[in-house]
Amino acid sequence: MPYRRRRVLGALLIAFAIALYINQTGPQPQTPPSIPSSTSVTTGDRAQAMLEKLPVKGRAPKTDYTRTQFGDGWSLIGTCDMRNIILHRDLSNAVVNDSCKVTSGILNDPYTGTVIAFARGPSTSDDVQIDHVVALSNAWQTGAQLLSLEERTQLANDPLELLAVDGDANQAKGDGDAATWLPANRAFRCQYVARQIAVKAKYHLWVTDAEKSAMQRVLETCPDQTVPVVTGGV
């Protein structure tokens, strides 16, 4: 199949997956406007006000936590998995093959403020990783173990919870919360914390004292910061 036809087919597969996602789940929260997106993004509640509504508790034990508590890897929407749907959302000039895989693109990385030329391959794919903004083990210890497996799987594949980011930054974050890890890119910290708050509110999770204090310190620098709200698309 000629290259141009393969690229068009790949783009159509992604578009089909997005349409299926909208029909299955309805409008979902989305990335800040600074990240390339195919959706219309508006602002929602102020992050500070939403943070004040979150319960404050200590961390539950990590007992029984495994990645499979949040589903068996990435969910499929049509023939496209969420990793590639998020790559397509967050990368500019994304090229998609006829297997619904993003093969290349440019990431304006929100965590480091650097620009990454992404190329799919054995030694390069991990240069860009998909981060769970609220680390799954953190979610497990702040209320997710009380959710059903279906709800946890939805959390792990929710576009609100997912960002394409620099691989090394994602590894450095590990399972840290706002009290132990924040993006090196200070310009993104307000949006990052607001997104964590939105995820915790949506899935009825709580914050620890230290986590809330760290979030408050960040939001003191941007009291008008709002949480992202999507009005269409993935």
Image (cartoon, grey):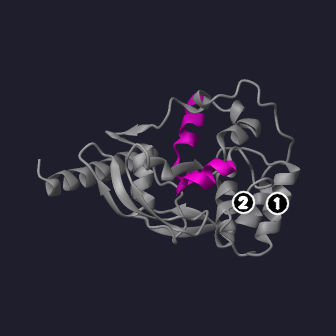
- Callout 1 environment at 10 Å: few (<14), some (14 to 19), or many (20+)? some
Q: Indicate the amino acid at tag 2.
A: Leu
Instruction: Name the outermost residue toward the left.
Output: 1
| Chain part drawn in magenta | 149-173
Residue sitting at x 43%, y 65%: 37
Compared with 213, 218 (above or below) is below
Could you say where residue 113 lies in the image, as x and y percent from the top left?
58, 69
In terms of secondary structure, what is the magenta stretch mainly? Answer: helix
Judge left or right: residue 18 versus residue 7. right
User: Could one spot residue 234 in this view of the protein?
Assistant: no
Residue 34 shown in magenta:
no
Residue sitting at x 79%, y 49%: 207
Q: Quadrant of the C terminus?
A: bottom left
Front position among marks 1 and 2: 2
Q: Which residue is mark 2?
A: 182
Judge left or right: residue 18 versus residue 97. right
Q: Earlier in the sequence, mark 1 or mark 2?
A: 2
Residue sitting at x 18%, y 51%: 6
